[in-house]
Structure formats: structure tokens, C-alpha cells
Amino acid sequence: MIFDTHAHYDDEQFDGDRDELLERLHREGIVNLVNVGYSKASIASTHALADRYDFIYEALGFHPDETWEMEQEEETILPWLREQLTRPKAVAVGEIGLDYYWDKTPREVQRKWFRRQLELARELNLPVVIHSREAAQDTMDILREMGQGLTLDMHCYSYSLEMAKDYLNMGYYLGVGGVITFKNARKSKEVVEYMPLERILLETDCPYLAPAPFRGKRNDSGKIPLVIDAIAQIKGLEREQVEEVCLENARRFYGIGHSADVRRENL
């Protein structure tokens, strides 16, 4: 009974066996997953997955590296994205944020569209999946300015314990995936040891960030039990407790069920 809160099964690395893999994963206990559409093309392919599989939901937005698309279509892009987010299986805005590692899009453009997508999430009363890489302070500043009252997931959290405490105090969730199994993941392990189990969202970010001993290979949701085992060991808990609580965390975060139906009726 595992919920993968952040996956990219529309990635070309799955082109050879996507349907076979997804059907097997569902049979083996991946009860739900959220595929993340992060550009116009990825949003379209995410729609196709959500339409094909009952257990797949969608988070839709523009990754910071892709916000150049938004800049090019400034007059029409937010109404278009709003329409996509009213689809029945759209459960979050994301992944949105800042990425100063690749710097594929000018930073001022990233910050502009990060703010505008946060405003859209507030308008639609949707949770938000945040991507932040080497942009710790700017991300924190924008979320302190605009994040109050929003339900947020710091996807693949990689910053300090001190900043994690700030995000937890703001009521946010932190995404935990394969990195927690790496030998050199000291900061991530400190964060997991400190944080309440009720704020952890299990994720893969597949096909990326496969846990040890598969590091560097293609990741998929079937490897999440390795993440669960690592969390259980760090926190001194039974793996069944970690699995059960994290499943409820994901359902609560994405509002899948009655609360999601109520939210959509109010759009």
C-alpha cells in the first residue's frame, strides 16, 4: 500500500516498457502515484497517463527550467494552465519553483512565474509541489511572502536541517526519496530523524534518483520499499508504520477522496 507522490512516467526512459511496468507496479502494491507534468509537452503526456490508468493522478505546472515557455506565451499561458488544472484528476500545481543549478532560464523569469503559479494555486485551492535547487534563500523568501495558507511539498528536500525546521514550522511537507539511502546523505538523514513522520511524502522522482544499491540506474516506484526501510531504521520505527502513515500523508496532501471532490465542486 504505497503512494508515490512524485514520478515522471512520461519520460522517454520508460518508452520501451511503460505499460507493462505500470501494470506490474499496481499489482504489486503501488496503490496511487502522481505523475508530474512540468512543461506543455509533459502536461499533455501526463494527461494521457492519467486518462489511461485509474490509479494515476496528475500535478501540473511549469518547472523553473521550462518557464521560458510561459514568458513566450505570457498573455495566454496562465488561462491555459488553469484549464488544465480543472481536469478531474489534476490534484496539485507543480513542480514549480527555482533552479539555479542548471540556470536554463533567467532567474528573474523563474521568480516571476514561480510567484504567478503560486497565485494560481491559491485561486484554485490546490496544493503545490515545490522544486528548489541551489536557490535556498530566494525560495524561502518567496514562500514566506506568498506561501501562507497554501499546502506545500518541498519536493526532494536537500537543504539544511535548520531550513527544514523553518519549513516544518510553516506547515509544509518534505519529499523523501532515494537520496536517503545514499551513504553520503548526512543532511537528509538528519532531517528525516528530526521531522515528524506525519510530514513525510514518499517519492521517487523516477526515472531519476534510484536508491542504493540501484544508484545511477533507472528508478521506479517499486524501489520505494528501500526508502521506507531507510526511514524506519533512521527513526527507529517498524516499516509497516512508516508505510501506513506515509500513505495517509499522501492522501491528505493531495486531497484524494471526499475532500478532493468538494474542492473541485468549488472551482
Image: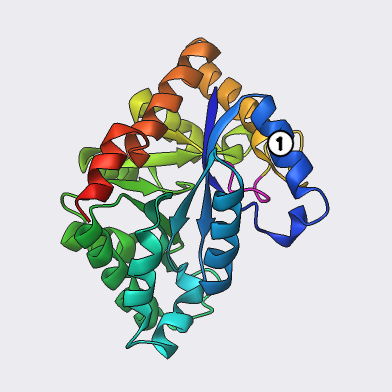
As drawn, which residue projects farthest toward the top?
Answer: 238
Q: Residues within 10 Å of mark 1 (few under 14, many from 20)?
A: few
Which is nearer the eye, 137 or 13? 13
- Residue receiving disc 1: 23
Q: Is residue 20 left or right of residue 107?
A: right
**Residue 27 on image: x %, y %:** 68, 26
Quarter placement of the C terminus: bottom left
Q: Which residue lies at the image location 45% right of the left edge and 70% below the top edge?
A: 64
Image: magenta residue range = 204-209
Q: Does 143 appear above or below 39?
A: above
Element on which disc 1 rests:
helix
Q: Main secondary structure of the magenta part?
A: loop
Q: Position of residue 44 (x, y in %)?
A: 56, 66
- Where 157 sits versus 47, above or below? above
Q: Is residue 50 magenta?
A: no
- Indicate whether residue 207 is drawn in magenta: yes
Instruction: Name the quarter where the N terminus is drawn.
Output: top right
Residue 213 placement, left or right of 118: right
* Vertical order, 18 against 199 (above or below): below
What's under tag 1, amino acid-wise? Glu
| Residue at figure coordinates x 26%, y 65% from the top left | 120
Q: Is residue 162 left or right of residue 89?
A: left
Instruction: Name the residue at 81% across, 48% down.
Output: 17
Residue 196 visible at all? no
- The picture places residue 48, in percent across and down from the top left corner, at 59, 58
Where's residue 224, x and y in %?
62, 31
